[in-house]
């Protein structure tokens, strides 16, 4: 397979009944060790990975995406993204035709570029150039300007543009492809995040193994950063809906904004940003309640006090509801052992927030493709670490 997000790949996935059905079938065809071969190599991508049959290539790649949906925006994502970009780039470098990729490109036809322009662009009169250099300078493809500008990060002055097409050399195209691949990968992981609880057990086991490989691979960076799990909150990177809830809201939205959204978001973001499983409890992640009592509850109570009218003044029992949403049952004096008496509510998805409290959702550019405020936050942390390439 030349591009796991290209037309051909999409057709294979559709024939399986769509992405969810495809992910369900994968464990019946391939094993975890085979999937890990895509991320455990050094130097050049292994021949058996490069030459795998198309369906096998697609399955091993999408298996990794399924595992990433359980753990988005961590070192695992960086590992999968970089190793697989190299695998596909190695194939694309040798490919005859790049029209099959997810990029909307066409091969240019004879005479399409005026000869005098071609002479300049391809430096045809520079006799000193080697055959290899000439090949690199050759303009081979064109891409619609409106697709091109979404991916191009340089100046438009550096590009030959004619009749709303950008004309490209193979090297430019491969750089654009890498950018598109990274975006497509992120988009797919966010899409799968929505269905992560329905994925077969295979993906949890794969995620465990993938985390081991990533921890080993990025050992030094992880040690330099400290923990990659629980870490101090970064309110500057919170999504707009959470920032708005923190400012306090009017009476119609108070309970939803404070008890449902803030309580779940702040607790997961601080204690367990990437929960290993659905039924995780706070006592699985911390040894005492000090983080909740000293860092999380004060933020929730202050936001409640900023509401109009203040939430806890006319609803003093709402504090018990906060503990209930944290998984301690309906109480105002919990101990760590009470964790698990109720469900630790996960932050609601964006579509739920928009349905229940539309005024909270004021998307910014980082919300693009995001399905849950917690993944927004993980994404911002990931970009801050310089891993997202944005
Ligand atoms: S898109 Fe999602 S994360 Fe962004 S503001 Fe709306 S609800 Fe929050």
Image (cartoon, rainbow, N blue to C red):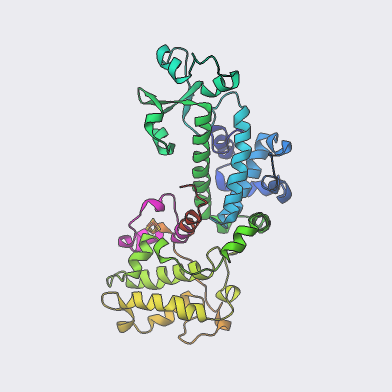
Q: From this view, report whether residue 177 is shown above or below residue 165.
A: below
Q: Is residue 202 visible?
A: yes
- Corner quadrant of residue 16: top right
Q: From this view, report whether residue 280 is shown above or below residue 288.
A: above
Q: Is residue 266 left or right of residue 57?
A: left
361 in the magenta segment = yes
143 in the magenta segment = no
Q: From this view, report whether residue 71 is shown above or below residue 346.
A: above
243 or 16: which is nearer to us?
Answer: 243
Residue drawn where x is 40% and y is 73% of the image: 259
Q: From this view, report whether residue 324 is shown above or below residue 84.
A: below
65 or 210: which is nearer to us?
Answer: 210
Q: Is residue 194 visible?
A: no
Q: Is residue 368 left or right of residue 60?
A: left
Image quarter for ligand 1 equals bottom left
Q: Quadrant of the N terminus?
A: top right
Residue 341: percent from left, percent from top: 54, 79
* Count of labels in the image: 0
Residue lying at the far front of the rendered structure: 128
Q: Is residue 350 left or right of residue 215?
A: left
Please, what is the dominant secondary structure of the magenta stretch? helix
Residue drawn where x is 73% and y is 37% of the image: 48
Residue 231: percent from left, percent from top: 52, 68
Residue drawn where x is 40% and y is 81% of the image: 319
Magenta-colored span = 352-377
Residue drawn where x is 31% and y is 78% of the image: 305
Residue 153: percent from left, percent from top: 42, 39
Residue 220: percent from left, percent from top: 63, 59
């Amino acid at each position: 397979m030349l591009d796991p997000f290209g037309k051909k790949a999409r057709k294979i996935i559709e024939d399986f009944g769509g992405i969810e059905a495809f992910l369900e079938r994968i464990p019946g065809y391939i094993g975890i060790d085979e999937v890990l071969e895509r991320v455990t190599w050094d130097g050049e991508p292994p021949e058996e990975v490069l030459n795998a049959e198309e369906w096998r290539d697609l399955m091993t790649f999408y298996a990794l995406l399924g595992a990433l949906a359980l753990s988005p925006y961590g070192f695992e994502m960086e590992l999968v993204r970089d190793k697989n970009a190299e695998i596909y780039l190695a194939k694309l470098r040798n490919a005859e035709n790049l029209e099959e990729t997810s990029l909307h490109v066409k091969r240019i036809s004879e005479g399409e570029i005026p000869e005098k322009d071609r002479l300049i662009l391809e430096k045809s009169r520079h006799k000193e150039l080697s055959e290899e250099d000439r090949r690199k300078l050759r303009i081979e493809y064109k891409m619609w300007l409106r697709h091109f500008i979404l991916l191009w990060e340089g100046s438009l002055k550096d590009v030959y543009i004619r009749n709303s097409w950008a004309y490209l050399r193979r090297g430019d195209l491969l750089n654009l492809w890498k950018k598109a691949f990274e975006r497509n990968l992120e988009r797919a992981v966010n899409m799968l995040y929505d269905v992560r609880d329905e994925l077969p057990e295979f993906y949890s086991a794969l995620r465990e193994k993938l985390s081991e490989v990533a921890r080993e691979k990025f050992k030094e960076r992880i040690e330099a950063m400290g923990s990659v799990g629980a870490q101090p909150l970064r309110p500057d990177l919170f999504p707009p809906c959470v920032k708005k809830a923190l400012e306090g809201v009017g009476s119609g939205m108070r309970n939803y904004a404070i008890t449902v959204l803030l309580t779940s978001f702040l607790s997961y973001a601080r204690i367990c940003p990437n929960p290993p499983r659905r039924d995780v409890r706070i006592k699985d992640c911390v040894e005492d309640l000090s983080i909740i009592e000293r860092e999380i509850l004060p933020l929730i109570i202050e936001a409640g006090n900023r509401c109009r009218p203040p939430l806890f003044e006319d609803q003093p029992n709402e504090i018990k509801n906060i503990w209930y949403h944290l998984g301690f049952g309906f109480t105002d004096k919990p101990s760590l052992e009470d964790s698990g008496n109720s469900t630790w509510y996960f932050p609601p998805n964006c579509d739920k927030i928009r349905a229940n409290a539309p005024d909270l959702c004021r998307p910014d550019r980082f919300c693009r493709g995001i399905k849950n405020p917690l993944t927004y936050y993980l994404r911002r942390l990931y970009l801050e670490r310089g891993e997202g390439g944005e």
